[in-house]
Image (tube, rainbow, N blue to C red):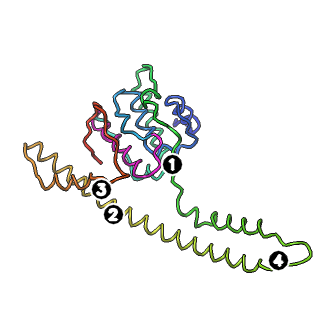
Amino acid sequence: MAASRTDLLAWLNDLLQINYTKVEQCGSGGAYCQVLDSIYGDVPMTRVKMNAKHEYEYIANFKVMQNIFKAKKIDKPIPVEKLVKCKMQDNLEFLQWIKRFWDANYGGQGYDPVARRKGAPADPPATIAPLSTTRSGSGPNLSVAGGRSGGRTPVGGHRSGSAQSHEAVLHLQTQVKELSSHLEGLEKERDFYFEKLRDIEILVQQQIEVLEGEGKDDQTLRDIQKILYSTEEGFEVPEAGGAPIDEEETF
């Protein structure tokens, strides 16, 4: 029988000495990586951002995890695209699998999670709220409430600017809806091109592995791979400090 969310969070918080309150927070990937470290003791925790705040940092954590799976020959697909969206059901199912894997492979050895993180902060990551939450009315409703609470009608008469204030609030609500729709379009466009780049990355990696198996190389493929893995300021993945895990980036 699968463990409940409450039981899983209690186990995770006790094992890693963190303070997660929702299963969705596992979508940052940091906790999954450290659970594996509690089993093997050689995960490059210097590369894992336990307090990741952005999706690109989540993806970097899962790349570390994929390298672990490859090095340890763990035959389990990691649904990265779903997990990084921080949806409860997807992360619940994966956390249940992680718990079963831990139960089957943890040797009972002592584990100091704080020392393995070298004191790095492990604040619970913020989950990504879907844009539909804003469009459904939570943002505009708050605006209306704020406008009404600050615009009480005096006893004995109408407030002179109340009609204009209401009109201004309606205008702001319209702007919020338009911006939310625009952001949703940008997110879909980003995901569209991200998937294309990911498909290219997989094809390039597979071809390089085939050539390496034949004792050959292809500089063009190497150049494409270099472009795919290049970073810019603000998006660097921390360098590993002599970690035993294969540092080859696979996705």
Which x, y percent locates residue 63?
A: 33, 44
**What's the residue at 55%, 39% (across, down)?**
20
Disc 1 packing (10 Å; few <14; some 14–19; many ≥20)? few
- Residue nearest the observer in this picture, 87 or 152: 152
x, y (%) of residue 201? Answer: 25, 54
Q: Amino acid at mark 2?
A: Tyr
Numbered tag placed on residue 89 in the rendering: 1
Q: Is 71 placed left or right of 210 in the picture? A: right
Q: Residue 181 vs residue 173: left or right?
A: left
Compared with residue 152, is residue 235 higher up or lower down, i.e. above or below?
A: above
Q: Earlier in the sequence, mark 3 or mark 1?
A: 1
Q: Amino acid at mark 3?
A: Arg
Helix, strand or loop at mark 3: helix
* Range of residues picked out in magenta: 50-72
Q: Distance from label 3 to label 2 (Cα)?
A: 9 Å
Q: Earlier in the sequence, mark 2 or mark 4?
A: 4
Cα separation between marks 4 and 3: 58 Å
Whole-percent x, y for residue 123 in the image: 52, 40
Label 4 element class: loop
Label 1 sits on a secondary structure element that is helix
Residue 131 screen position, x and y as percent: 53, 62
* Above or below: residue 202 compared with residue 180: above
Q: Is the residue under label 3 in contact with that under label 4 (CB below 8 Å)?
A: no
Q: Circle 2 sits on which residue?
A: 193
Judge by depth and name the residue closer to the eye, 122 or 197: 122
Is there CB contact under 8 Å for labels 2 and 1? no
Residue at the disc numbered 4: 159
Which numbered disc covers residue 198? 3
Q: Nearer the viewer, residue 250 or 224?
A: 224
Q: Residue at x 21, y 53 (%)?
A: 225
Residue 204 located within the stretch drawn in magenta: no
